[in-house]
Image: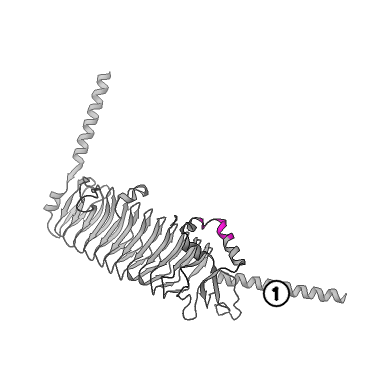
Amino acid sequence: MKRLGLLVLICFWSLIGHAEAQEIIPLQPLIDQTKANGELILDAAIYEGNVVISKPITIKGKKGTVIKGDKTGNVIEIRSDSVVLDTFSVEGSGMDRSSHEEYSAIRVIANGAIMRNLNISDSFHGIYLNKTSDTTISNVDIVGKGTGEIANQGNGIHIARSSNNHIDHSRIKQTRDGIYVEYSNGNVITDNTITDTRYGLHYMYSNNNEFKRNSFIKNVGGAAIMQSDHILLEENKFSFNQGSRSFGLIVQTSRDIHVLNNEFHLNQRGLYLEQSTSNVIEGNEFFQNQIGIELWTSSTAHVFVKNEFRKNRIHALTVGGESNNDWFRNGEGNFWNMPMFDFDKNGVGDEPFEYTSSLGELVESNELAYLFLSSPAITIFEKANELLTSYKVMAYDKYPLMSDRNDKGFTWIVVAALLLAIGLVLYKKKAVRK
């Protein structure tokens, strides 16, 4: 009986091994056989990676199609213009950082590539664009190895010296940086979701790019804009980026950045500005951050207008001395979620608003202060300094805006107070007559 069982087991493993051997289909010969501008259709099977594409072709798979590398190099390298990759999975690039290059699932060194409906995993970089232009990446899922190994892996999408590329409706998680951009201009990045990375977006020495409707959620830092000019960030979400020095968005050594209509929710610091100039922060919502905006006075000539601050531990913090920035423009300021009078009903508070805090010097002198931002001790510290009048003006808003919620709520309070006062007067008069 034992001999029979052993025989069955050997046959079983032999069949599995045979099946696995049959599942690996050489892909490079199929690519070589495809004519230029032709289409290569793949089955729901595993194909052998580490291939090079040197002519304009379309490779199209289906659910269950996998191109698998041997973990020694790039799984797919595109050297020709106008290559299309559509609907399959890619995995198994080299992970060795001591090699002559950093490997990736897909490396592109030509123009006009289109990559869509792809799943990428088990690779150092997901997609690497090197000196390309007019690349389209759409509906791609990239998964790294997780936050425990961030330092030992690459980026979801790495864009180096590449311009006029479009990335949309893709999802990246657990890589080092979600999208890393350097020396690359004219890129448009929209409707992507990036989570559990170091920086969702890491952006350096690149100009004239647009980022719209992306979600940077639960990263160490949502997005970092450094050494770059003329950028639009519109309707993005920077949320749940928490840590000892985390941020939703950092703008550093950059100018002419337009931060328009974004959401900053539940970050340690919503927006951090340092050594930058002439940026416009407009129409954003800062909600339940420990610090809504942290502004170092090395940043100048900024305009903050039509932003809404609600339930942040500290709405705005100026660090390093007096601020040379404007918190209003053309008769409009910001919503501060504070009681204000607006008797002329023009939507603007009747008096200028000064937002004050005493934490600027504390943060400047001791970075450990960040660790206690959520502590009740900070509230006590602020109240004590308020009593001692040792607080400082963090933001001077000449035209504070009245949000509908504030206006209605405060109006009802005023109306109730007036009715109560009138009632007391009438009661006293009636009592005197008696």
Image coordinates for residue 180, horizontal then vertical, percent: 30, 60
Q: Quadrant of residue 203?
A: bottom left
Q: Quadrant of residue 163?
A: bottom left
Where the N terminus falls, by quadrant? top left
- The residue most toward the right is 434
Q: Amino acid at mark 1?
A: Leu
Where the C terminus falls, by quadrant? bottom right
Q: Is residue 431 magenta?
A: no
Image coordinates for residue 276, horizontal then vertical, percent: 38, 70
* Dominant secondary structure, magenta: helix
Badge 1 crowding class, 10 Å Cα cut-off, few under 14, some 14 to 19, many 20 or more, is few
Q: Is residue 237 left or right of residue 158?
A: right
The residue shown at (45%, 71%) is: 283
Vertical comparison of 98 with 189: above or below: above
Vertical comparison of 295 with 174: above or below: below
- The residue most toward the front is 365
Q: Nearer the viewer, residue 77 or 9?
A: 77
Residue annotated with mark 1? 418
Residue stretch rendered in magenta on the structure = 372-380
Q: Is residue 377 magenta?
A: yes
